[in-house]
Image (spheres, rainbow, N blue to C red):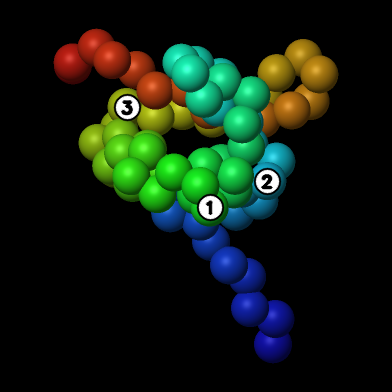
Amino acid sequence: MATTDISPLTGIIAEELVYVDFGEHEGKSVLEIADTLPDFYEFLVESKEGGKCIIRRSKDKSFRLYVSQTAH
């Protein structure tokens, strides 16, 4: 039986395939952020849990992570 790791931020998409598309960390992969900036990674996880985080596939077939700053 194969075990699939599920990221708390990207789900079944591998963290090295998802790139931040905002702010000073734009262009960094989620995996890189998890390794080097654990506090920012935790912020992203909390944003996802709060429904403020979205992953979109761009025209170049890459995955981009966005965080909404607006309150609903």
Q: Which image quadrant is residue 2 in?
A: bottom right
Q: Residue at 62% x, 37% y: name it.
A: 29
Instruction: Report whether 51 appears left or right of 13.
Output: left
Q: Is residue 2 left or right of residue 53?
A: right
Which badge, 1 or 2, comes first in the chain's sequence? 2
Rounded to the nearest angstrom, the CA distance separating label 3 from label 1 is: 22 Å
Q: Which residue is mark 3?
A: 52
Image coordinates for residue 43, horizontal then vertical, percent: 31, 39
The residue shown at (63%, 78%) is 3
Q: Can you identify the residue that label 1 sits on? A: 35
Sequence-first tag of 3 and 2: 2
Query: Which residue reaches farthest right?
Result: 60
Marks 3, 1: nearer the viewer: 1
- Is 34 placed left or right of 71 in the picture? right
Q: Secondary structure at mark 3?
A: loop
Which quarter of the figure is the N terminus placed in? bottom right
Q: Which mark is residue 16?
A: 2
Q: Disc 3, disc 1: CB below 8 Å?
A: no
Q: Closer to the camera: disc 1 or disc 2?
A: 1
Quadrant for the C terminus, please.
top left
Kind of element beneath mark 2: helix
Q: Residues within 10 Å of mark 1 (few under 14, many from 20)?
A: few
